[in-house]
Image (cartoon, grey):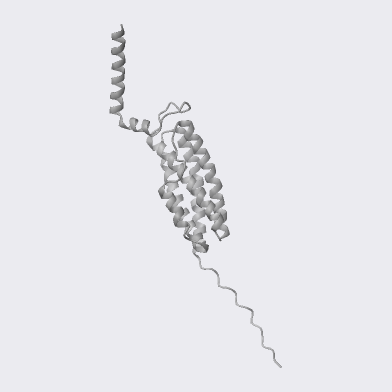
Amino acid sequence: MLGKTLLKNSIAIALSSFAVCQNPAAAQIAQFSQPTPNQSSQQITVLDQEFAAEAAENAQAAIQLGQMAVQQGTNEDVKIYAQQMVQSNTKIYNQIKQLASRKGIAIPSEMGNANRLEMENLSRFSGAEFDRAYMRQMLEDRTRDESLFGRVALQGDDPDLKTWAKKNLSAIKQQFRSARSIARDLRRPAPAPEAPPVTAPNTP
């Protein structure tokens, strides 16, 4: 009896190992993020895991860049836009952090090298040059985020992440349009100062 039980257990283990070998993607997912008790029974794909991690990191970068622009910016429109980015991305980060925790997805707790380099480059500017550099960076970052969120909104597998990506996509597009408008205004030459009024000379 004991021998039969051991044989059955050995067969079950062998079949499980074979299934993992035949599905390397599943093995990669298992290594990427271990499930938690609150995780949905549906397996989270690598695409969705990478989306959650990248969205969280990009939101952290947008918050820190926005805080820098609020402090160092000189143009009022730039400072208002930067404050809006801090607020909206704080909300995005908190939402994706909660979603990821519920689904057992690991997200970074700090920025990666690429986003850190953005901050270092931006810190080299001051005055009007800083304003223009910040808005150029916002155009690049919003284009990147629009592509990231749009891809998951169309191709994502997890229904919650897919719905969340769709929900935020329209706001990201609006942020891009606002950044483009402000950047365009910053490129326009400043109006020439008005000449002082000409007064007629006093005649004796």
Q: Is residue 153 visible?
A: no
The picture places residue 156, in percent across and down from the top left corner, at 41, 36
Screen quadrant of the C terminus: bottom right
Quarter of the image where one finds residue 106:
top left
**Extreme residue in the right direction:** 204
The picture places residue 115, in percent across and down from the top left corner, at 43, 49
How many circles with numbers are drawn on the protein?
A: 0
- Relative to 163, does residue 134 appear above or below in the rendering? below
Q: In the picture provided, is 160 more to the left or to the right than 192?
A: left
Screen quadrant of the N terminus: top left
- Relative to 192, does residue 89 appear above or below in the rendering? above
**Extreme residue in the top direction:** 1
190 or 53, which lies in front? 53
Q: Is residue 196 visible?
A: yes
- Relative to 141, does residue 100 appear above or below in the rendering? above
**Extreme residue in the front direction:** 2
The picture places residue 96, in percent across and down from the top left corner, at 49, 38
Residue at left 52%, top 52%? 66
Q: In the picture provided, is 201 more to the left or to the right than 33?
A: right
- Relative to 42, does residue 88 appear above or below in the rendering? below
82 or 165, which lies in front? 82
